[in-house]
Image (cartoon, grey):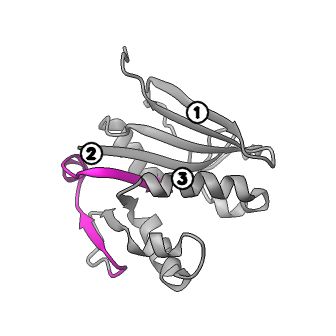
Amino acid sequence: MRKIVVSEFMTLDGIVEAPDQWSMSYWNDSIAQFKTEEMQEADALLLGRVTYDGFAAAWPAMIDQPGGKEMNGYRKWVVSSTLETAEWSNSVIVRDLDEVAGLDGTLLVFGSPGLIQGLIEHDLVDAYRLLVYPVVLGQGKRLFGTDARTNLELVDARDVGSGVTALRYQRKADAD
């Protein structure tokens, strides 16, 4: 059985683009614990090409950093119609969302806002793990587009310090 979990750093106004430019000053042990929990629940990563390229350039050199062994060890499904090869360890290219629908296990999606928009449009997202930061940017790539009606159930909400709230949502069982 497949379960797709979207994990995002997000501003109060829904921006998920370039979190390295606005989220790092808030990092703390509670946020690290939230991220560790989600990684422990995942069987594999599901990434868009741009996020994959960034991760593949950075994570192999961070094997001794927190999360490095896990990130390098996971199976990584890369959704791309243009990528020719995926050299990062355990990476497999998936050409379209029909292939994604046929995958098994708990797939964790980091970054990849374009991929997430497609997953939402194809009704493939089962859960969201959001770290909402006390930042308003006003512009940038948003998590949800204008046609993203989704009925969700709040599973967990917690203050993780630094003004950041960790939210866990899952697909609502009795969605309209």
Asked whether 118 or 151 is in front, the reply is 151
Q: Is 104 included in the stretch rendered in magenta?
A: yes
Element at badge 2?
A: strand
Range shown magenta: 87-112
Element at badge 3?
A: helix
Q: How many marks?
A: 3
Q: Quadrant of residue 46?
A: bottom left
Asked whether 29 or 164 is in front, the reply is 29
Identify the residue at horizontal 23%, vertical 54% (top origin): 96
Per the rendering, the mark at residue 2 is 2
At label 3, which amino acid type do we have?
Glu
x then y, percent, for residue 74: 37, 68
Query: Which mark lies nearer to you, 2 or 3?
Result: 3
Badges 2 and 1: C-beta atoms under 8 Å apart? no
Q: Is 32 included in the stretch rendered in magenta?
A: no
Residue reaching furthest to the bottom? 61
The mark nearer the N terminus, 2 or 1, is 2
Q: Quadrant of residue 132?
A: top right
- Compute the Cα span from label 3 to label 1: 13 Å
